[in-house]
């Protein structure tokens, strides 16, 4: 039966993935309907009120470089900013912010309402309309049918969500919001495999009941930066966070609740996040430690509510309350609500194509926690890519697929689809083999040209990238061509604790010394200062030039690795390749290759269980 599409794209869910998906598709020209349970909770920060961090900060900058909004919304609602890992190399520098939880959601809603092509519908999707393995629409809880050319499912933790607090459990996607049922069961009938995962959140505390003088104060950066490459404003004032610790008394009280814990009694079936364990897990797994660090994070400018980062728990309310009051500074703590665990359905991501379209139902895309990831940033980047690719497909254009050497987003999607995940997937810098190329400072240079070509990044954004590149290139040429005499520079070199020079030397040689920074040379050499002032995008371009010069050997080595691997990435494997007919492949390789259907030899080589000899067999078969 032929249905007239009311929308180009229907986005199910209004979390971080849904927001980026809707915005990207609409800005590219698609008509979009966002269906979400509660319009007042769009882009809700369900867990901690923070964005970025190790590798996650790089992802936000990549989203921004591609024309997404997470960086802009984050900048507009920050209450604190810190650049992490500045004592390490630039591949590790990671921006992180504390945000005003209420303002963040409000800013996202205003942003989406300002995009002409987006309509909204407040309801729950209970069924997908699928005809001959092609999605054509959705049905909501009140029986409303909406038809579209493509559907992006961003259900978060809502699919058959079950909340646990001690012995109590009840259905819900978040506290105060009902779970969504029916979709997992329907998709199972279409051949999809489902699994269960678990995540948790700590109690929320009344900040008026805390004694901050007994805790360590954690300030933001003196000169705070920001996430977006656009002209968002850096913070003028900041709120402090605080640090405190659990102790042996805390641990003993928590242990008394383990018998009734849903995790230890087997009531929770889902796998929890390895890298963000509950306080119960920490006590069990690290029993040799007599304390664990906790971060006391304010929820916003105009609220006393506090988020206790590091104290995620599903123990009973009574145990939580008693244990909290043994913590330094929390002796009189009052809870706004207890911590809880939630388990939910997810779909193993090996069932997706690299575009995030499902393999079993055409024009249906999955993004966010439904794919087994954890974290706002991981969800948002998937939403962005699903929104872009859904639009491109219905307009019969080539998809946007980012390689592992092009973006952390490319690493994340390739990891999910090629390796799958049976525990909540979180991004780390260690997952990226080319992390020196994938720095937070050059995300715009890497990705904005691609986005501009698609029509997502504006001409203004592209001009800013060109100015930054021009400044970096001009400075590199200047350093290479300009010499400095001992009389001009030795006093500075002595102050910096590095060897003085005996004859003229090129600036690039001086700047390659670890002790010498670009700002040192600029402040000491009037001719360099005057040259820099004639260039656009001075600060960003200068940082690029300095990093490229200081780390040139490492950068060249990584680029050579990329070129070596790109030969394998360029050898295409078609989706109808019959691996079962190649007896020379190992039985595990035949099984895994048939299931995952890699798009290139490079992707095939990263599948667990596919050996180098299996890759050689494929290369021989392809005549390579």
Image: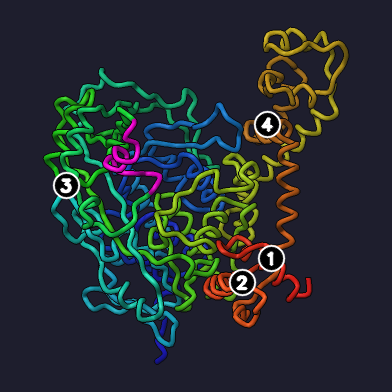
Asked if the residue under mark 3 is in contact with the one under mark 2, i.e. CB atoms within 8 Å, the reply is no
Which numbered circle lies on residue 63? none
- Residue under label 4: 542
User: Element at badge 1?
Assistant: helix
Quarter of the N terminus within the rendering: bottom left
Residue that appears at 57% across and 30% down: 88
Asked if the residue under mark 3 is in contact with the one under mark 1, i.e. CB atoms within 8 Å, the reply is no
Counting residues from the N terminus, which is met first, the one under dot 4 or under dot 1? 4
User: Element at badge 3?
Assistant: helix
Asked if the residue under mark 4 is in contact with the one under mark 3, i.e. CB atoms within 8 Å, the reply is no
- 4 or 1: mark nearer the eye: 1
In magenta segment, residue 64: no
Counting residues from the N terminus, which is met first, the one under dot 2 or under dot 1? 2
Q: Is residue 424 left or right of residue 174?
A: right
* Residue 501 image position (x, y, % from top left): 82, 12
Which numbered circle lies on residue 613? 1
- Residue under label 3: 259
* Residue 80 image position (x, y, % from top left): 39, 31
As measured in the structure, the alpha-carbon distance from the residue carrying label 3 to the one carrying label 4 is 58 Å
- Range of residues picked out in magenta: 274-288
User: Element at badge 4?
Assistant: helix
* Residue 357 image position (x, y, % from top left): 49, 70
- Residue under label 2: 586
């Amino acid at each position: 039966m032929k249905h007239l599409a009311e929308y180009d794209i229907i986005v199910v869910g209004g979390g971080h993935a849904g927001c980026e998906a809707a915005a990207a598709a609409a800005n590219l020209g698609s008509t979009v309907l966002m269906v979400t349970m509660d319009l007042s909770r769009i882009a809700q920060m369900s867990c901690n009120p923070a964005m970025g961090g190790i590798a996650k900060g790089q992802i936000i900058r990549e989203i921004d470089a591609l024309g997404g909004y997470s960086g802009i919304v984050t900048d507009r609602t920050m209450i604190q900013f810190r650049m992490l890992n500045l004592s390490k190399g630039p591949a590790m520098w990671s921006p992180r912010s504390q945000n005003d939880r209420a303002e963040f959601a409000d800013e996202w809603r205003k942003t989406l309402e300002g995009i002409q092509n987006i309509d909204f519908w407040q309801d729950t999707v209970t069924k997908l309309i699928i005809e001959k393995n092609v999605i054509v629409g959705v049905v909501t809880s009140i029986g409303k049918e909406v038809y579209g050319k493509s559907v992006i499912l961003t259900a978060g933790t809502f699919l058959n969500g079950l909340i646990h607090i001690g012995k109590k459990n009840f259905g819900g996607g978040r506290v105060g919001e009902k779970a969504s049922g029916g979709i997992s069961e329907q998709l199972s009938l279409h051949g999809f495999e489902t699994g269960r995962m678990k995540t948790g959140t700590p109690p929320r505390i009344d900040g008026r009941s805390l004694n901050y003088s007994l805790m360590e104060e954690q300030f933001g950066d003196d000169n705070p930066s920001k996430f977006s490459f656009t002209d968002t404003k850096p913070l003028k004032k900041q709120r402090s966070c605080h640090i405190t610790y659990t102790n042996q008394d805390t641990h003993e009280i928590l242990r008394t609740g383990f018998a009734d814990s849903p995790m230890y009694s087997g009531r929770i079936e889902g796998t929890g996040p390895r890298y963000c364990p509950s306080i119960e897990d920490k006590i069990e797994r690290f029993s040799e430690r007599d304390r664990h660090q906790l971060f006391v994070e304010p929820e916003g400018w105009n609220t006393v509510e506090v988020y206790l980062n590091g104290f995620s728990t599903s123990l009973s309310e009574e145990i939580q309350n008693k244990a909290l009051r043994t913590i330094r500074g929390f002796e009189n703590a009052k809870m706004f609500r207890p911590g809880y665990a939630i388990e939910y359905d997810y779909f193993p991501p090996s069932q997706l194509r690299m575009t995030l379209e499902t393999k079993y139902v055409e024009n249906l895309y999955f993004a966010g926690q439904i794919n087994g990831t954890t974290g706002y940033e991981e969800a948002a980047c998937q939403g962005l890519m699903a929104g872009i690719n859904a639009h491109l497909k219905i307009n019969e254009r080539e998809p946007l697929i980012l390689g592992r050497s092009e973006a952390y987003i490319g690493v994340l999607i390739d990891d999910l689809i090629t390796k799958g995940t049976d525990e909540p997937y979180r991004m780390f810098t260690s997952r990226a083999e080319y992390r020196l190329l994938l720095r937070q400072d050059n995300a715009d240079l890497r990705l904005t040209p691609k986005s501009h070509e698609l029509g997502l990044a504006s001409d203004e954004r592209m001009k800013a990238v060109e100015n930054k590149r021009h400044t970096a290139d001009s400075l590199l040429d200047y350093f290479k061509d300009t010499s400095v005499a001992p009389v001009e520079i030795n006093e500075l070199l002595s102050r910096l604790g590095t060897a003085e020079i005996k004859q003229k030397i090129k600036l690039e040689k001086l700047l390659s010394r670890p002790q010498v920074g670009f700002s040192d040379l600029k402040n000491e050499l009037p001719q360099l200062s005057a040259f820099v002032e004639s260039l656009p995008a001075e600060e960003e371009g200068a940082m690029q030039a300095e990093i490229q010069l200081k780390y040139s050997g490492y950068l060249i080595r990584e680029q050579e690795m990329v070129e070596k691997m790109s030969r394998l990435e360029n050898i295409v494997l078609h989706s109808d390749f019959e691996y079962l007919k190649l007896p020379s492949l190992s039985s595990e390789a035949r099984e895994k290759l048939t299931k995952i259907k890699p798009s290139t030899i490079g992707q095939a080589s990263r599948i667990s269980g596919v050996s180098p000899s299996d890759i050689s067999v494929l290369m021989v078969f392809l005549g390579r």
